[in-house]
Amino acid sequence: MRTLNYLLLAVHDPQKSAELYSKLLGCEPVQNSATFVLYVLPTGLKIGLWRTDDVAPTPKPAGGIEISFSEASRDAVLATYAAWTELGLAVVQEPTDMDFGFTFVVEDPDGHRLRPFVLAGRPR
């Protein structure tokens, strides 16, 4: 059986992206160079930030990935919204109720979407 445990994001400036992702993920990278940054999260998931110009084959275009973050409650989603908008992230979707739960979407500087959510029916 295959295991999905690694996300690779094409970014224009890995160092600049790392400043943001360290805040978003609450941890520091385990590898950090001018062309590549790697995070290993406590869950085992790895997230790599690779300079777009060095990715082979060349991706089209940079951005376009959506990463979702499970939250414990609606209030936690709203707290994340406040923290992330304070970082200056572009809001693509304001906090809203959807069929699956309560969510919002912001974009990082490379256009990757970040979606925190709490499943419908979870506590406030």
Image: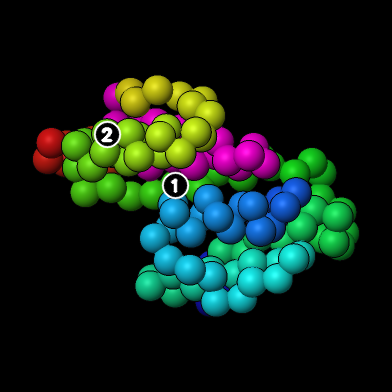
Name above or below for residue 2 compared with residue 110: below
Which secondary structure is most common in the magenta stretch?
A: strand
Q: Quadrant of residue 117?
A: top left
Region of the chain picked out in magenta, as a range: 97-116
Coordinates of residue 72 in the picture (x, y in percent): 21, 49
Residue that badge 1 annotates = 68
The kind of secondary structure element at disc 2 is helix
Q: Nearer the viewer, residue 51 or 42?
A: 51
Coordinates of residue 91 in the picture (x, y in percent): 49, 27
Residue at 48% in and 68% down: 28
Q: How many marks?
A: 2
Residue at 70% in and 71% down: 33
Coordinates of residue 31 in the picture (x, y in percent): 61, 76
User: What's the CA distance linking mark 1 and mark 2?
Assistant: 15 Å
Residue 78: numbered disc: 2
| Image quarter of the C terminus | top left
**Mark before the other along the chain sequence, 1 or 2:** 1
Residue 53: numbered disc: none
Q: Would you say 78 lies left or right of 69 here?
A: left
Q: Would you say 78 lies left or right of 51 here?
A: left
Label 2 sits on what residue type?
Leu
